[in-house]
Amino acid sequence: MGSFKKNREVLLALCLCSALVNNVYAAETSKSQNDLEKYVLDEYVVTATKTALSEKKVPMATEVITQEKIKNLGAYSVRDALRMSIGLDVQETGMTGNVVQIRGMNNSHALILIDGRRMAGENTSVTANVYELSRININDVERIEIVRGPGSALYGSDAMGGVINIITKKATDPSASIGVYTGSKEMGTNMTYASGKQGNLSFKISGNLEDIRKQVSKSDGVSTNMYGPRRYLNLSANYDLGKNRGLDFDASFMKEQFTAFDSSNIEWYNNNRSDYSINYYGKDDKNNYNIRAYYNTLKKANQKRPSSNWNGIDWTDWDRSEYNTLVIEGKNSSKLTDQHTLTYGAEYSNLGNKGTRLGAGGDKVYQDTLYGISKYGSEKNLETYSAYIQDEWQINDRFFVVPSIRFDNHSSFGSHVSPKIGSTYNLSDNSRLKINYGKGYRAPSIAELYYSMDRTMGSMRVQVLGNPDLEPEESTSFDISIEGEKGKAFTKLGYFHNNVKNLIESGSVQTIIGPGMPPSIIMRTQYENISEAEIDGIEGEVGYSFNNNWQVKATYTYLDARDKSDNSFLNGRAKHNGTVQLVYSDNKPNPLTATLWSQWYVDYLSRTTNNSITYDNEYTYNTLNFIVNKQFTKNFRAYAGVDNIFDKTFNIDDNHAYDIDGRTWRLGAEWTF
């Protein structure tokens, strides 16, 4: 009966998307390709194959968010820029961070890159990517490329669900800008200066001073977000060596100084991240190559005390953590013949973790005392040696195939091979069929392998232990889609399937009652490979341009995400979600653009446990949002927006796993020179 219900829902969703497709194609049959609205124009994407291919040609499901769209959305962060993307869920999760799910996969299954570089950050299945989208200077972003589906054949670990590559502005184009913004959640100012080419050298500097406003949870009236100042500084330079060769230098810095309250504690956070990169590149008639080395580190320090000095206790806990990433890599794309372009490369990576959350679980164990509290700490490094190869095979005018394979040798579990094959078949000049099949994997992180965390949380101590015997998570994925354009309309309709094994999660919780008055309560858990999941889904996108001013677009995702052990729906996901977007532009030389969109979720599951009893609650809700952007002169623009216009508020569970905070607003202006 359950299988019949599942298949029935899939069939209904397919029928709905098919009806949308048929209506779009029936609506306009005689207009030329030149009449397509702006968001139908074919963008080039690099992330999917590590070569520049058009979105229409590349087999993988991709999306490009341009700088123009980022501006029109009034985006304060990368999270803002992504929130209308198909197949991507980037909701704010209460007072702590973000959900980053691609096609229903876990947070940790999305690989987030900056200019193709991995960034040091939190590395458990729960914390991975939770804060990442807010730690990137949106003012320095040129475009964002999203690839849905496994990317392990080129990128290795962590790309099981897909890849989000944030591409920054380059130093070679002269420009300068100053911006200011304010709103319900943050306020700040930013600046950018790029010299353009001065002889052989060009350089760029970009900075952002931001203040995250304090927000109090409406569910308990006490808990807050992490609020306070965040600072960015981005530096880059290019030196032209001549003959299509050059050197790129990049450095970036981010600093957070946050405070947060809950019902019994106040906690301070001081986070610093730095990133350094050097890249040598060149090309000739047949080859396009580069050799790059980069290093980045995130250092975190926090301490807490009771909200009021309970029993005279000044400090109750503290932590120190450091995450490091070192990568040396080389790549070449060689055009062998008119039919074949071969891309191949090799990579060495060294991921490091040091601090008190490792306790004595790592190497070089030490002991620190701070605020009268002593803690053990240690450090651990994991190395990976990798090589990959990919062929872009243009079989004929209609048929394009991209096979690829990657070999990784990992210091904690040995070797892993990740193959993938994708194809694009042009049904006509304006329609195409795309099919992909591949394997993905995620290596256990240092935290999941070696953690020995012991923290005070309220009246309890929480202990989280690593497990050196963990196996890597593995996935087998398949997707098929059809897409096309007709006159002023376009549509995409696809089906995807992911089978995920060896999911890493924190296992069962042990409750230990310690001695003393009052007795101490210890909640202890250990990471385990405890489940398998099967995720099926349908994603559809349809758009139509009524005239030169008005456009409409809708996205839809149906998700059937199950724990295979008991066939239960996976927590923190909606069975149906999507957006409906209405876009206006007056198309003048200094245009006014406005976007009204509704974002909706149906049967969003929140599973909570209280006193060993599990509760499943499903929620259906939507928010209506509006943004307007006006270019007053060639050098000045301003924007204003309101999210959640109708001020919907609720808290899904008592742990603040997801809050709807109510109506928020934003204003901003930018001067360019």
Image (spheres, rainbow, N blue to C red):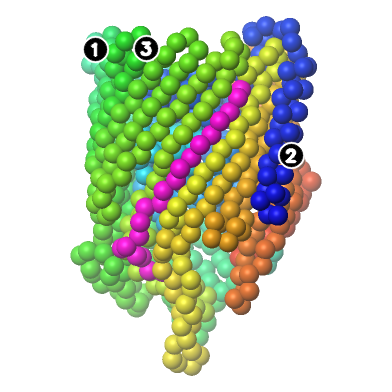
Identify which amino acid the numbered label 2 is placed on: Leu
Badge 1: how crowded within 10 Å, few (<14), some, or many (20+)? few
Where residue 408 sits in the image (x, y, percent)?
28, 42
**Disc 2: which residue:** 12
CA distance for labels 2 and 3: 41 Å
Where residue 224 sits in the image (x, y, percent)?
59, 61
Image position of 262 (left or right of 242): right
- Which is more foreground, mark 1 or mark 2? 2
SS label for mark 3: loop
Classified by dominant secondary structure, the portion drawn in magenta counts as strand
**Disc 3: which residue:** 339
Identify which amino acid the numbered label 3 is placed on: Gln
Mark closest to the chain's N terminus, 1 or 2: 2
Image position of 503 with respect to 496: above or below: below
| Range drawn in magenta | 464-483
SS label for mark 1: strand
Image position of 72 (left or right of 364): right
**Disc 1: which residue:** 242
Mark closest to the chain's N terminus, 2 or 3: 2
| Residue 600 seen from this side | yes
CA distance for labels 1 and 2: 59 Å
